[in-house]
């Protein structure tokens, strides 16, 4: 039972291009949607996150677009750089008094070529 | 970097043997989590803790147990390791919001 579906599984983008990764969720109780970036041999690290009261959030070259009615959200990486080559995970949770138990997508391996 | 230390970082063991992975934090965060990462599955929650001696099951808890006797330490135990438990295990900590992950423990069960 995959509550958060992520696509594509892998992505190759030219330097300077736009990388787009999509996620869809099923649980309408989810109210926190982060994206994590993971480099080989390292743990995931928070990249950017959004809550459902806004439709878009931008931090530098990274933007989350959120569509509550479609239960979808996406990560856009503008002006993609070779240093952005990593695995990206979307996630979702319903933040409660029991902490923040994230449900992750299956990951997208991004490669940015020169 | 968040003060999270996982040990051991790498372990090879045989089927049927017990294994304990340790997560140690210096941030005094209330919540601690154990995830496993497998190709095609992303990260899946095994167990989590919301305080000393307070733990609960996650999505894939079968075959695993945890203990938290001190705020800073969260132990994951495989009572009798199986080949299906070959994985990379990540500990994470949080205070309601952002999760901070350790660098992982790679476990191979032969």
Image: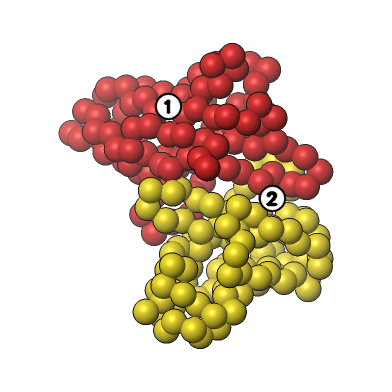
Chain colours: A red, B yellow
Frontmost of labels 2 and 1 is 1
Work out which residue is located at the far left of the displayed protein and give it: A114
The correct choice, above or below, for A93 with respect to B90 in the image is above
Q: Are marks 2 and 1 in contact (CB under 8 Å)?
A: no
Q: Secondary structure at mark 1?
A: strand
| Quadrant housing the N terminus of chain B | bottom right
Where does residue B93 sit, x and y in percent of width and height? Answer: 66, 55
Q: Nearer the viewer, residue A92 or A13?
A: A92
The correct choice, above or below, for B16 with respect to B31 in the image is below
**Cα gap from disc 2 to disc 1, whole angstroms:** 26 Å
Q: Which residue is mark 2?
A: B94
The disc label shown at residue A22, or none:
1
Where does residue A32 sit, x and y in percent of width and height? Answer: 65, 32
Where does residue B102 sit, x and y in percent of width and height? Answer: 54, 59
Residue at the spot 37% in from the left edge and 79% down from the top edge:
B110
Residue at the spot 24% in from the left edge and 29% down from the top edge:
A13
The reply to whether label 2 and label 1 mark residues of one chain is no
Residue B39 visible to the viewer: yes
Quadrant for residue A22, please give it. Answer: top left
Residue at the spot 78% in from the left edge and 56% down from the top edge:
B50
Residue at the spot 60% in from the left edge and 52% down from the top edge:
B59
Judge the density around disc 1: few (<14), some (14-19), many (≥20) Cα neighbours within 10 Å.
some
Judge the density around disc 2: few (<14), some (14-19), many (≥20) Cα neighbours within 10 Å.
many
Q: Nearer the viewer, residue B12 or A83?
A: B12
Q: Nearer the viewer, residue B54 or B82?
A: B82
Q: Secondary structure at mark 2?
A: strand
Q: Is A70 left or right of B31, judged from the image as shown?
A: left
Where does residue B103 sit, x and y in percent of width and height? Answer: 49, 61
The correct choice, above or below, for B74 with respect to B56 in the image is below
């Amino acid at each position: 039972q995959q509550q958060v579906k992520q696509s594509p599984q892998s992505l190759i983008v030219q330097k300077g291009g736009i990388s787009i990764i999509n996620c869809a969720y099923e649980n309408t109780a989810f109210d926190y949607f982060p994206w994590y970036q993971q480099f080989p041999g390292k743990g995931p690290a928070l990249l950017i996150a959004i809550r459902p009261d806004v439709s878009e959030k931008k931090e530098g070259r990274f933007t989350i677009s959120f569509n509550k009615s479609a239960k979808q959200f996406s990560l856009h990486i503008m002006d993609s750089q070779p240093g952005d080559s990593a695995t990206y995970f979307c996630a979702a949770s319903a933040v409660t008094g029991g902490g923040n138990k994230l449900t992750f997508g299956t990951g997208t391996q991004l490669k940015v070529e020169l | 970097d968040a003060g999270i230390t996982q040990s051991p970082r790498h372990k090879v063991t045989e089927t049927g043997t017990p294994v304990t992975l340790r997560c140690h934090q210096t941030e005094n965060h209330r919540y601690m989590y154990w995830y496993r990462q497998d190709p095609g599955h992303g990260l899946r929650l095994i167990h989590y803790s919301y305080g000393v001696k307070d733990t609960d099951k996650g999505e894939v808890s079968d075959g695993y147990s945890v203990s938290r006797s001190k705020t800073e330490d969260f132990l994951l135990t495989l009572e009798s390791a199986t080949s299906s438990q070959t994985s990379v295990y990540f500990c994470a900590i949080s205070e309601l919001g952002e999760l901070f992950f350790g660098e992982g423990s790679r476990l191979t069960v032969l």
